[in-house]
Amino acid sequence: MLKKFDDPKVRQSAAMDDLVRQAVFGTGDEKDRARWMIWEIGQQAGVRPASIHELYLARGRGEVPPFTTPAMNVRVMSYDTGRAIFRAAKRLDVGAVICEIARSEIAYTDQRPAEYVAVMTAAALREGFTGPLFIQGDHVQVNAKKYAADPETELSALRSLIEEELHAGFYNIDVDTSTLVDLSQPNLDSQQRVNYERAAEFTKFIREREPKGVTASVGAEIGEVGGKNSDVHELQAFMDGYIRTLKRLGKHVGISKISVQTGTSHGGMVLPDGTIAKVQLDLPALKALSQDARAKYGLGGAVQHGASTLPPEAFSNFPACEAVEIHLATNFQTIVMEHPALPADLRREVNEWVKTEAKEEWKKGDTEEQFLYKSRKKAIGPFKKRFWDLPESVRAAIGADLEKTFAFLFEQLRVKGTRWWRPRTTPRRASERPRGRVRLRGLLAGHRGRRGGRILVRPGSGGRHAAQAVETAAQPARRRRGEGRRGARTPGG
């Protein structure tokens, strides 16, 4: 059965639809077999989970032009949404795109990491997309209340999730210990101390468990989304403390990006009529934070969260401010939930379920519109199969509008054409002056062959930093139990 998927026509047919359905709704054995098959088909076809770490470090050194990678939380109608992402990516030649899911979303959308990887891989295969598949664990976040009550139990839960994500093929993980920042402390270092110490410990944990040949992209966060706006002094306090702590823990590669707060909130600020309030983005702060992250610490730049509900004209600002990544979620859910093609009876059932099963989330003073907008995401898991089983015509209409949205974002964020980038190399000493261009084709267009390998620097191209920028990030790690554990590594990132 596996052999027939060697044919691209079969991969891009209803046969893939049937296989991914088994991976999601089959019996235990059927799920395992279908997920294994999708993984193996992806390995053969050149759709392989990968890390974006090396590309971000190349951006930090100025070897690629400014871009902002869209990291998109796929919550509802995941297969159809994934297909829309990869249709737009294929048409616009996009390589720098991330599919992600947060710790909280895993629960309420009923999508464990192994299922999520299978669905995103199948969606890419179905649309004929090839290349590295950047799948990310978003907001691997410490719950501050649980941490205060029992720190080790909460940290252990996050370590278990990280192991599950790495084993599934999540080679990009955003550690979020910013919930532990204590603004009551007298100085910035003490305010950020628990944040940077736990972030360094999680980095070490990831480095010791990532598959051989993969340097996972690890992100950290200095300001909780929806809280106080970040500034460069907080960035410096966090990074200096993080570097000290990580060095004390051993020789490990560090983070590739840093998430900051600049005025947004998850899902946006909902007005009484259910519409979204305008946000005052602190774009100068975002630009300053990105510049410092690159110039002082060699990171790809700052990461913007909570942005999908911004007005269309706002998105071109992010590559202009040189933000390296932007997280987008709620608007895609809204497109599905409010789409005119969605059957009225399903919409009504979802709303009634939310009013009954999530009524404890209805805050005093909120209108029904505000409550439903903020809480209907909790119905995604219970109604998952209903959305998957929508008539093909309905799913096609919703998918077409999602594709238009993704294409617009790809163009505004300057990731169009990123599958074929050849980054500029910056001359340093005369002896290091490059005589050629470094090729990122292998990173963004995928490797040939089942075993992949090191991305090659053109003969005659100079500069050790340029060579470091293009170490392979997409080797097809084999998911055998016990594989990937290793000891200390040289500093970097």
Image (spheres, grey):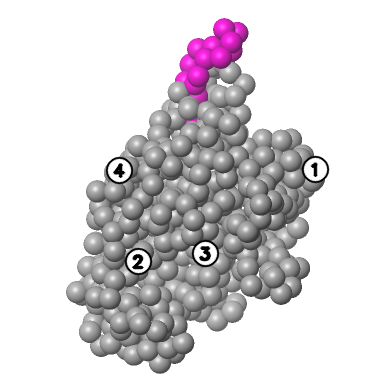
Magenta-drawn segment:
425-440
The residue pinned by badge 1 equals 248
Report the amino acid beneath label 2: Met
Q: Which mark is residue 316?
A: 4
Q: Residue at x 43, y 43 (%)?
A: 286
Q: Which of the 4 image quadrants contains residue 480?
A: bottom right
Query: CB atoms at circles 4 and 3 under 8 Å apart?
Result: no
Q: Amino acid at mark 3?
A: Ala
x%, y% of residue 134? 50, 50
**Quick one: label 2 or label 1, which is nearer the N terminus?**
1
Image quadrant occupied by the C terminus: top right
Mark 1 or 3 closer to N-term? 3
Q: How much space separates mark 2 and mark 4, taking CA atoms?
A: 21 Å
Residue situated in front as seen by the camera: 318 or 429: 318
Q: Which residue lies under the disc numbered 2? A: 269
Residue corresponding to mark 3: 102
User: From mark 3 to mark 2, how far is it between C-alphas?
Assistant: 20 Å
Q: Is residue 186 visible?
A: yes
Query: Disc 1 to disc 3, how far (Cα)?
Result: 29 Å
Q: Residue at x 34, y 40 (%)?
A: 414
- Identify which residue is drawn at 66% across, 52% down: 186
Q: Which is nearer the eye, 223 or 356?
A: 223
